[in-house]
Image (tube, rainbow, N blue to C red):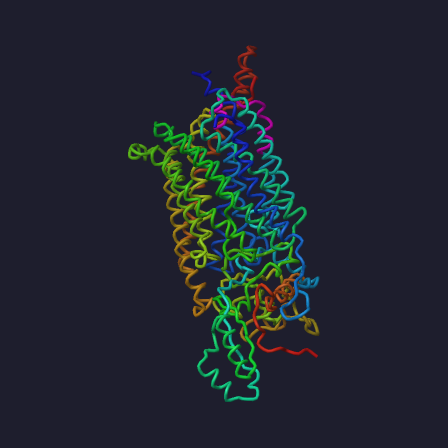
Amino acid sequence: MKNGFLVFLASLIALGGSWCGFVLAPVLQLGGGKQTTILNSTDLYPVGRPGMANQGLQVYRANGCAACHTEQIQQSGVTCDVVLTSAGKSPLAVTNAISSLKLNNIDKVAADAAVDAITAAGGKAEIHIIATGPDITRGWGRRRSVVEDFLYDDPVQLGSLRIGPDLADVGTSRPDANWQLVHLFAPQSVVTDSAMPPFRYLFHVQRINGEPSPDALVFPKGFGPRAGYEVVPTPQAQELVAYLLSLHTDVPLHDAPFTQPLVVSKP
Amino acid sequence: MPDSPDLKIDRSCCVPLLALFGGATLWLGVSSVLGLLASIKFHAPDFLANCAWLTYGRLQPAADDALLYGFCLPAGLGVALWLLARLSQTPLHGAVIPVFAANLWHLGVLVGLVAILIGDSTGFAWLEFPRGGSVPIFFAYLLLALWAMMIFAGRRERALYPSQWFLVAALFWFPWIYSTANLFLVAWPVRGVVQAVIGWWFANNLLVVWTGLVGLGVAFYFLPKFTGRPLQTHYLALFAFWTFILFATWCGIPPGAPVPAWLPALSAVAAALLIVPLLAVGIVGWRTVWGSIKSKWDNGPFCFVGFGVDCFCLSGLMLMAMACPKISLVTQFTWFGSAETQLRLYGFFAMTMFGAVYYLLPRAVGIEFPFPKLARVHFWLSLAGIALLILPLAIGGVIQGLKLQNPDVAFADITKAMLPFLRISTTGLLFLLLGNLLFFVNVMGLTLHWKVALLKKFIAFVKSPMDETSACTSLRRDKGVQA
């Protein structure tokens, strides 16, 4: 390589290649991302976060929460349970059919075979899909995180280090706004040995004048401000909690299926 | 020999180098202080908790960016300028522009760091500077790269030395990746996880490829110089160059990311192929240094550069491990990744730059460092600091990963189990801070001597009876401005 132009060309080929692969191609493939339908439903997913939660994402970004928290559930696989829904006209035949079958914690092929056997005996059964993996066992989410979960986020805050727990589904696992606020103000009061720094600058400690504020935090026993004072969240703290409560991965999707435990009928 | 060509070239770079290295040294100290403050929070979460500016999530990115944009990039650019001038046997003309660019750069870093601390970060790792910081540093880089390319274009010999391939490619790399990342993530943000993909692509190309190109370019110049043996061999170095830019640029998408599976799969393949350039670099370094190791360990700059190349290979192996899907199950989301990045930035890049600066700055300015013996102390402090920072984070990261994979271990217990490792790493940061202070003292002392000498010359010139031509040229030469 005697010519400076060749160096330039080499760089152009190498970097241009990866630019096409990791910038252009993802933009083309995913940039026009659309909503998808929820599994076994016609509802669309995701719907955008409410305005306050969107502002909360900016509080999350400004305070660098992603330095310690990820928002990506990992999943190692799926397992299936076969659930008998009807014994049909000949319960004895169905009982005989399932007595030799393993119905829990099996793979999809075995589950299909079991359903076939039960159907042949005149019964009815359905397959429940359960996502597996340490994150899911920890209760951090129901399924792995997928592309659709982040469709309306800007900036997308995936994070890369779990100094604190994953937050992708924290709106499902910790739905109590007061708990979230207290945890932000004094993490160690609700999570013993938490390494999270307190975010007291997102709150006002003020003297109670007459009626206590309706927004004031309710602390567990032994914590909280001294008598006559109350802790009130700033709008930023409320937005941040609105964002945290809007984090869910509790919706089954085509590329990340699971079966809801029981269909909750909403009035 | 006051007028030997090398001396003329060295002096022509003097003022731009002082401007680049002076600010870089300052930012290095700032980065160490911010990093130490952030690290203390693990042991005392209440520490400085009432100040929004100093919350962990702002301190840590600020410390990282102060190291990368404050120190690594300007130091690398300064060394590249000097090296290209030396290798091209061409002095730097119009020094005022690179000096301006250096100051613009440092201004951009200042704006960017303040922006992160007041909560104006963009929220993308390694790209946190908002427009007020990113636009100045982008144009400052363009100016510096333009000047470096002018030197390169004016070279005396058409044939290129391997270092020139690495450095010229690096000059070209940064504007492309930095503009892409800022346009697609900040100016006109793309939708959803594509942001994360472009963020990973950018961070990998800056942290792995850019630093690799500059650091190896510098090492391939200095290793032969210090050992007195020619580079073994040019062809192998060329092979390392090609394979490195072809494979390394495709790394960076972590396995398990919530993106289409072909993206991390491609990265994993590229990372596995990275073994080829790593081996090539290892062989080049080993064969160039072999046989002269013992005699050279008392040479300060050599220690820095040699250690840097070792760290390059080691951090490359760590990168390969993290990209392997099976190993990544354990290492993902743990301190292991931080250990790899810190090893690359501190152990490899910063150490190589320290060695280069200790060698070239006294030559460029024509003044010795005020405390040359402190360079060795700096080396040993950095060595201890890096070992105490990286080893606990890497080992702790693996333990953390194994515990995260076992859902029976409560999360609070994982946090507790990490504390001893984090304590050691805080000690490591303290060592690094001390070492960096010594570097600061030496560079600032030298700059001060240079300013005092300049002032004395100026006073002598004003007072002296009129023999203007000679005084004038000598003053101009010392200011690095071509007469």
Which residue occupies the foreground of this view, B131 or B29? B131
Magenta highlight: main SS = helix
Q: Is residue B378 visible?
A: no
Image x and y of residue A29, in percent:
62, 52
Residue B94 is one of the magenta-drawn residues: yes
Image x and y of residue B362, in percent:
44, 28
Q: Residue reaching furthest front?
A: A120
Q: Is residue B152 visible?
A: yes
Which residue occupies the foreground of this view, A256 or B342? A256
Image x and y of residue A37, in percent:
66, 65
Highlighted range, magenta: B83-102
* B375 left or right, relative to B10: left
> Quick check: B212 above or below A73?
above
> Quick check: B255 above or below A179?
above
Task: Check the picture and name the quadrant holding the C terminus of chain A.
Answer: bottom right
Q: How many marks?
A: 0
Q: Quadrant of residue B288?
A: top left
Q: Residue at x 50, y 32 (%)?
A: B167
Which residue occupies the foreground of this view, B454 or B355? B355
Image x and y of residue A91, in percent:
53, 88
Residue B464 is one of the magenta-drawn residues: no
